[in-house]
C-alpha cells in the first residue's frame, strides 16, 4: 500500500487531497495544526504538529517513511503575509526547503524513490513579463507570500537536480466552499447569500479591479496527485487560462441569486486594499495537459454558483 504524508491537511486543499488519496486506497498521514483541525475522511491518521517546530516534523517523516510527500502547509493569505512576514518566510519558504532535505535523507536511507510535491503559487510571478504565464516565466514576487513561495519553488528545482522526484504545482487561485471565511471569494459568497436571505445589506470589499485566474479546488488537487505519479518530476502551471476581476465574481454571485443591479449593495473600503497587489495573473496549463493529461473542467461561473449554493444550503 502506498503511504502518503500531507502537511496542511486541515486546509482546503489538504481536505480534498485526503479524500482523493483515501479513495485510491492510499494510507494517508496528515500533519494537523491545532488551528486547522482536519475534518475528513476518518481513515486518515492525524499527527499533531507545526512546521515551525521542524525537528519534530523531521523525526515524524523519517519514522513514517512515506512514499509520497505533499507539502501544502502555508500561511495561505497574502494579506496575512504583510502582517506576519517573518512567520510567512519560516513556514512558506524555509520549512519547505527543510522538508525537501528530509525527503532526500529518507530516500538515501531507504534506497527507494520518494515522491515530493510542493504546492507552489502563481504569486511567485508577481509582476510577470508575459501573459499568460508558463513554467519558464521569471520569478518576480511582489509580496511576502510570493517571496517565500518563490524561495521554496527554487528549492524544488535544486532537489530535483540532486536526484529527488520533486515537482512543483504552480497553483493559480482555486476556490471551493472549504475556503476560509477571510478569503475574498468565500466572503463574497457568504455575504451575497446573506443578502439574498435578507440577513445582510452590504458587501464590503477592497480592490474590485484585481484580476485572477480562478478554478475549482478539487481539480487542482488532482493535478498534484498526477504530478506525484508522473514518470519524470517537473514543474506545472495549474490554471484555467482565463482571468476575471473581483467585480466579475461579485456580479456572478449576485446574478445567481437574482440580483442584477448589485453596485449599490457593494462598498469599497480602502483599508482592505493591499499595499501591493500582483498584476493580472493568468496561467498557461499546456504542459500539465500534455504531460499529466490534466485539464480544468469546472468553469468560472460554475465555481461561483457552487460556492453561493453551499452558503445558501447551510441555512
Image: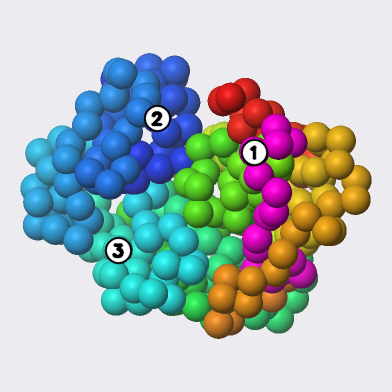
- CB under 8 Å between discs 1 and 2: no
The quarter of the picture where the N terminus appears is top left
Residue 296 position in % (x across, y down): 71, 40
Q: Is residue 274 above or below residue 104?
A: below
Q: Is residue 146 above or below residue 260?
A: below
Separation of marks 2 and 3 at Cα, in angstroms: 21 Å
**Would residue 294 be visible to someone looking at this image?**
no
- Point out which mark residue 18 bears: 2
Question: Which of pointers 3 and 1 indicates the residue nearer the eye?
Answer: 1
Q: Nearer the viewer, residue 150 or 81?
A: 81
Instruction: Give SS at disc 2.
Output: helix
Instruction: Give SS at disc 3.
Output: helix
Which residue position is annotated with label 1?
199
- Point out which mark residue 91 bears: 3
Q: Quadrant of residue 17?
A: top left
In the image, what residue occupies the spot 56% across and 25% down?
A: 314
The question of residue 142 being in magenta is answered with no
Q: Nearer the viewer, residue 33 or 98?
A: 33
In the image, what residue occupies the spot 53% across and 71% down?
A: 124
Separation of marks 3 and 1 at Cα, in angstroms: 38 Å
Amino acid at each position: 500500500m502506498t503511504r502518503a504524508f500531507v502537511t496542511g491537511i486541515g486546509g482546503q486543499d489538504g481536505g480534498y487531497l485526503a479524500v482523493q488519496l483515501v479513495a485510491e486506497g492510499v494510507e494517508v498521514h496528515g500533519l494537523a495544526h491545532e488551528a486547522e483541525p482536519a475534518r475528513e475522511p476518518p481513515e486518515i491518521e492525524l499527527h499533531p504538529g507545526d512546521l515551525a517546530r521542524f525537528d519534530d516534523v523531521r523525526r515524524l517523516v523519517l519514522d513514517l517513511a512515506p512514499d509520497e510527500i505533499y507539502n501544502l502547509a502555508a500561511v495561505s493569505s497574502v494579506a496575512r503575509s504583510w502582517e506576519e512576514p517573518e512567520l510567512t518566510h519560516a513556514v512558506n519558504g524555509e520549512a519547505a526547503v527543510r522538508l525537501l532535505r528530509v525527503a532526500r535523507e529518507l530516500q538515501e536511507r531507504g534506497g527507494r524513490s520518494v515522491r515530493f510535491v510542493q504546492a507552489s503559487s502563481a504569486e511567485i510571478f508577481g509582476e510577470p513579463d508575459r501573459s499568460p504565464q508558463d513554467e519558464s516565466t521569471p520569478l518576480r514576487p511582489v509580496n511576502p507570500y510570493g517571496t517565500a513561495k518563490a524561495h521554496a519553488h527554487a528549492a524544488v528545482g535544486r532537489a530535483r537536480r540532486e536526484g529527488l522526484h520533486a515537482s512543483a504545482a504552480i497553483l493559480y487561485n482555486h476556490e471551493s466552499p472549504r475556503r476560509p471565511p477571510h478569503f475574498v471569494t468565500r466572503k463574497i459568497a457568504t455575504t451575497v447569500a446573506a443578502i439574498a436571505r435578507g440577513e445582510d445589506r452590504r458587501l464590503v470589499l477592497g480592490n474590485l479591479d484585481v484580476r485572477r485566474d480562478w478554478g475549482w479546488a478539487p481539480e487542482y488537487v488532482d493535478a498534484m496527485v498526477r504530478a506525484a505519479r508522473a514518470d519524470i518530476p517537473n514543474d506545472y502551471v495549474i490554471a484555467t487560462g482565463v482571468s476575471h476581476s473581483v467585480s466579475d465574481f461579485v456580479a456572478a454571485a449576485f446574478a445567481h441569486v437574482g440580483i442584477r443591479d448589485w453596485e449599490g449593495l457593494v462598498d469599497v473600503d480602502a483599508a482592505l486594499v493591499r499595499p501591493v497587489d500582483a498584476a493580472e495573473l493568468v496561467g498557461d496549463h499546456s504542459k500539465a495537459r500534455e504531460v499529466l493529461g490534466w485539464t480544468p473542467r469546472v468553469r468560472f461561473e460554475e465555481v461561483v454558483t457552487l460556492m453561493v449554493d453551499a452558503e445558501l444550503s447551510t441555512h
